Amino acid sequence: MAGGNPVFDRLNKQIEKERYAGFGAPQGSPQQPGAQTQAATTGYATQDAMSAQQLNDMYARQSAGPVDTGRVTLDDVIMKSLGLFALLVAAGAVTWVTVSGSPGLARPIWLGGMVIGLLLGLAIAFMKTVSVPLIVLYSAVEGAFLGAFSYTINTIPNYKGVVLMAVLATACTFAGMYAAYAFGLVKVNNRTRRIFTFMLIGYALFMLLQLVLQWTGVLSGWGFGGSGMLGIGLSILGVGLAAWSLAFDFDSIDHAVRLGAPARYSWLLAHGLIVSVVWLYIEFVRLFARLRD
């Protein structure tokens, strides 16, 4: 889950702490250690040693951009997000085909992928360094989980078509939230972040409790509220939170690009988007399934 997600919270704190508006002072500037001493002892010797052609070449050279200085760019985040999403879809498709031939594998892959994905997500969120292998592995594991989960839902007669509806709803919601953020219809600030974080923590604890009660047999089916009005209301709340989290993801990406975060954080930003999209898809599946019941 992003927005109130530790992935984006850690990134924002890191950016604010280190204030990556650039990476050090230019060579020979007063801020560079030893630059004043060097200037005092050499005067204009360095400049005099340069030919007119060298000076012309230097002034004609284009200014260094974010890519040249090793900073996050929007294009970089987009490309990495597309790459991780393609891996997720490919893993999901392979798993779907595999379990369709051996239906008995669906449940182990589903449960195993859910647990492993959760552990990987926590590791990525709280590690002090950005681990690209773990991020890539997370997308593959989540793809396997979604493939087995979606196949299982699709085999239930009453839920035929729910998976396709959830895919379309997720894509439309993503596009709608991006447009709303881009045109300023959705505002992200410190106050809304705090509100969302508290709501997310409460919802996460509620879902954890529900999961424990389902595993122990106290609850069955879709959990609290079942497929009644309460259950549908809870699913609508989950969809709303997941959709709202996308706006915070977009803002975190924009914030990182504007402040010039290190390029390695583009992987973390892309991972955060994948987390939100997966969460939104699962909430849509739960909602449409409950409506079918």
Image (cartoon, helix red, strand yellow):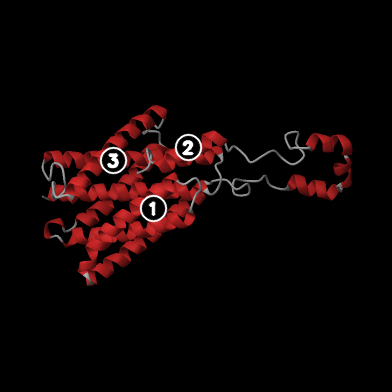
Q: Which numbered marker is on residue 12?
A: 2
Whether residue 43 can be seen here: no
The reply to whether the C-beta atoms of the residues labelled 1 and 2 are less than 8 Å apart is no
Q: Say which residue appears at 16% left-offset and 51% top-offset.
A: 289
Q: Residue furthest bottom?
A: 101
**What's under tag 3, amino acid-wise?**
Ala
Query: Can you tell which mark lies on residue 255?
Result: none
Q: Of the residues shown, which amino acid type is indicated by label 1?
A: Leu
Rendered location of residue 208, percent (x, y):
25, 43
User: Tag count in the figure?
Assistant: 3
In the structure shown, which secondary structural element does the residue marked by tag 3 occupy?
A: helix
The residue drawn where x is 15% and y is 42% is: 224
Q: CA distance from mark 3 to mark 2?
A: 21 Å
Residue underneath mark 1: 120
Q: CA distance from mark 1 to mark 3?
A: 17 Å
Does 184 sit above or below residue 227?
Answer: above
Establish if 161 lies above or below 184. below
| Residue for badge 3 | 204
